[in-house]
Amino acid sequence: MFGINDPQIWLAYLLSVLSALGCIIYGLMHWNDKDPLEES
């Protein structure tokens, strides 16, 4: 697919996309959390 035959390259692309999605999901879940240092 796309002329890339090496499975390690596909794994790198897959992990990059999954980590980006994980960061987006984490950011959306903790968007309006209060800073624990401000509450003191």
Image (cartoon, rainbow, N blue to C red):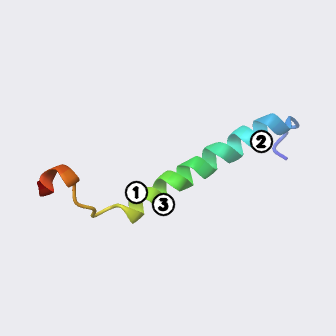
Residue at (45% x, 57% y) in the render: 26
> In the image, what residue type sits under mark 2?
Trp
Secondary structure at numbered mark 1: helix
> In the image, what residue type sits under mark 1?
Gly
Cα distance, mark 3 to mark 2?
22 Å
Q: In this rendering, does residue 7 appear at all?
A: yes
Left or right, 25 with respect to 11, comes to left
Mark 1 vs mark 2, foreground winner is 1
Labels in figure, total: 3
Q: In this rendering, does residue 4 appear at all?
A: no
Give neighbour class at mark 2: few <14, some 14-19, many 20+ (Cα, 10 Å). few
Q: Which residue is mark 1?
A: 27
Cα distance, mark 1 to mark 2?
26 Å
Residues tagged 3 and 1 counted as in contact (Cβ below 8 A): yes
Residue at (40% x, 64% y) in the render: 29
Cα distance, mark 3 to mark 1?
5 Å
> In the image, what residue type sits under mark 3?
Ile
Is 19 drawn above or below residue 12 in the view shown? below
Q: Which residue is mark 3?
A: 25
